[in-house]
Amino acid sequence: MSRKRAFIVAITAGLLLVGTTTGAAASARVAALFGNGGFETPRAPQNSFTNLGTGSAIGPWRVTGGNVDLIGAGYWQAAEGDQSVDLNGVQPGAVSQTFDTIPGVRYDVGYSIAGNTAAGPVVKTGRALVDGQNFQDFTFDITGRTPAAMGYVTRAFSFVATNPTTTLTFASTTPSSANGPVLDNVTVKPCGCC
């Protein structure tokens, strides 16, 4: 192998190693700073719920609009763990979490959505926002669903961080109802291969 070719191979291998290390470091950083995606803390009463208004905390999440219900274990099926959040408490609400990010890095967001089956509207609606910008609208039809079989679906989207911190928000757009979209199992992971 020529010296030039050996040099190019060494540089390429070094860049791949740095990229892998940077992706792993970014992943560890987000995993340590983004949390409670299953809304497991604090604990809501078993087989019941806690209504939380604007400014209330659900671990690192904050209620940033209207109010929401933190649903306790046994009230209905959770997507993961025991708890979930109804994004309509007595009115449409929103929850937000701010976490550290690395500008220029792409992050993948996943979440599970269902709907409060107690009453209409039949189609629950909402949106996911990043730093106040709408990234994804979602809908969920509760037809045929029950508290024991909520029928969660997984949604996903990606964003590229532009700041050292990013705020992820989930907001209900289901009007004037105490029975909104149900959120659970939120994940945020940097894309290590991008």
Image: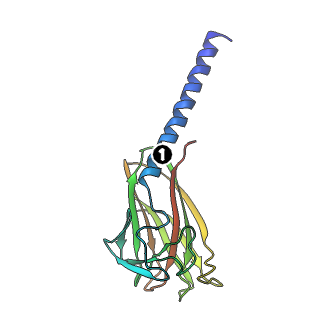
Name which quarter of the figure residue 166 lies in.
bottom left
Q: Is residue 159 above or below residue 4?
A: below
Direction front: furthest residue: 46
Relative to the observer, which residue lies in front, 169 or 27? 27
Q: Is residue 37 above or below residue 6?
A: below
**Residue 153 place in picture, x, y as percent:** 61, 69
Quadrant occupied by the N terminus: top right
Residue 105 in view (yes/no): no
Q: Residue at x 55, y 80 (%)?
A: 76
Name which quarter of the figure residue 170 lies in.
bottom left
| Residue designated by label 1 | 28
Name which quarter of the figure residue 93 lies in.
bottom left
**Residue 123 place in picture, x, y as percent:** 56, 81
Q: Residues within 10 Å of mark 1 (few under 14, many from 20)?
A: few
Quadrant occupied by the C terminus: top right
Direction bottom: furthest residue: 119
* Amino acid marked by disc 1: Ala
